[in-house]
Structures are given as structure tokens and as C-alpha cells.
Amino acid sequence: MESGASVVHFAPGMLIAYGRAIDAVAHQHTLWQMCFPLQNSTLNGRAISDTFVIKPNEVHQLNMSCGWVVLAEPESRLGEAIAQAMPKLPHIDASTLATLKEQLTDFPELVSAINNNPYNSDDQRIVKLLNRLDQCLSGDCLKPEQWRAQDVANWLAISQSRFLHLAKEQLGMTWRSYLLWRRLICAIQSIKSGNSLTSAAYIAGFSDSAHLCRTIKKTFGMTSKQIIASFG
């Protein structure tokens, strides 16, 4: 098995991380989660050493001493590829993203989605919105007042009720949940860049650092300190 530094990779519709000492409490989220343990792990108290997938909204408790976690939005190409590859995924012993993809060559759709993860939305208004949200991946997060449902609906020239329906249909989750997820990516990216929790919370549009910490705990089942220690 290789040894390597922690990795956190952000791209549209996904978060890929390699780290150590992942010890989560029971939690659930709306994302596909693919895990490649490099050492023995437990899922819901059961020992597991092979690659495994956690479906959206499944309650789970993960303890993994070393390995990869891939999170994918439900209505993304990567989410779809994970669902299709789920029964056959191989054991992985890579600790770099390049090697991880090399060891997944028998799953070209999965590797292609990791390299380029276009959204599956067929509504151009939602695609326009997602492209604007993706600007935040550069580290220049847009402030929360720009993302209220009514304001987004006005920008897209549709009613608020129509926008909320489209968001849930096209994104696989409510607009509130989706926006929280995107803000969380911005916050983690900010922390990874060296900002404090308070600064990261402000940059990503959380009301304060306590709100950010609660969201991290709810989404990942880990405290902010544990996240930083695992993937810092």
C-alpha cells in the first residue's frame, strides 16, 4: 500500500477526499458516497475491507482508519456512474488521485465522470444556475443574499414555486438542502486554504462558525476539528 499526504479535491457535483482517522457518528445526507478503505473499516458496526457504496439518504456510521471518500450529487454524471458500478467496484490501494483513477480503468464511465462531471439537468435554467454556482469553486464564494429562492427565481424569470419544483426535480434535493451543500463545499475549501472557522463561515455565507460546525456534523457525522484532522 502506498503512503501519501491527505487529498481534498473539489469539482462540480463532487468532493473527493483521502484521509485518515475517519470516525463518524450515525448520520445521513442526500449524496452518493463511495468509500475505498485502505485498511480495515467498520460500517454500521460491521467490519468491512472492500470498496462499498452508501446510497443517498441512508443512515450510516463509518469508521475508516485510512482511505478514500467520494461524495457525488444525486443528479450528476458521477452519481449515476457510482450507482451503475456499485455491485462490482474493486479493492483500491492508492493514496493519490491519479493512482486511484488508474486502478479504476475497468470502469471508464466512473473515471470519465471523475475527470468531467457534467450535471444531468435537462433544464437550461437550472444549468445556468449551476454554472453560476460553480464560480464558487474558484474560492470566490457568492454571498447568501444572492441565493434566496425568490431572487433566484426572478433571475431565471420564473415563479418561486416553479423554481423550487424544478430545483428538487433536477437536483435530486430541495433548493435549501442543495444550497447548504454548496456552501459547505465553499467552507471546507476555505478552511483547507488556511482560513479560520469564523472566516470560512463568513466566506461561505453561514450565519456564524457555530452554524457551520452544526452543518459539518450533520452532513459528515464528524466535528469540524475531526474533519480538519482527517483531511487537513
Image: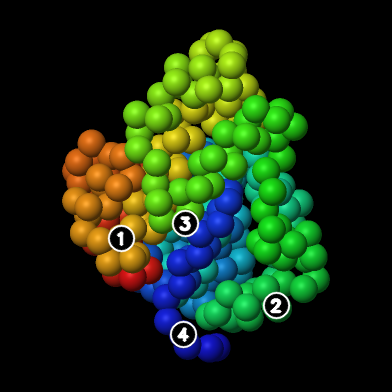
| Drawn side of residue 215 relative to residue 124, left or right | left
**Quadrant containing the C terminus in the rendered view:** bottom left
- Mark 3 and mark 1 residues within 8 Å of each other at the beta carbon: no
Q: CA distance from mark 4 to mark 1?
A: 20 Å
Cβ–Cβ under 8 Å for marks 4 and 2: no
Q: Secondary structure at mark 1?
A: helix
Regarding mark 3 in the picture, which secondary structure is present there?
A: helix
25 vs 123, left or right, is: left
Mark 3 Cα shell of 10 Å, populated few (<14), some (14-19), many (≥20): few
* Mark 3–mark 4 distance (CA, rounded to whole Å): 25 Å
Foreground mark, 1 or 2, reads: 1
Real-space CA distance between mark 1 and mark 2, rounded to the nearest whole angstrom: 30 Å
**For residue 4, which numbered disc appears in the image?**
4
Q: Is 92 above or below relative to 27?
A: below
The mark nearer the N terminus, 4 or 2, is 4
Circle 2: residue type: Gln
Label whose residue precedes the other's in the sequence (4 or 1): 4
Q: Which tag is nearer the camera, tag 3 or tag 2?
A: 3
Q: Which residue is mark 3?
A: 138
Which of the labelled discs sits on residue 103, or is there none? 2
Residue positioned 68% across, 63% down in the render: 115
The colour scheme applied to this rendered structure is rainbow
Residue sitting nearer the eye, 180 or 79:
180
Circle 4 Cα neighbour tier, 10 Å, few/some/many (<14 / 14–19 / ≥20):
few
> What separation in Å lies between label 3 and label 2 (alpha carbons)?
28 Å
**Residue that mark 1 sits on:** 191
* Pointer 1 or 2: first along the chain: 2
Q: CA distance from mark 4 to mark 2?
A: 16 Å
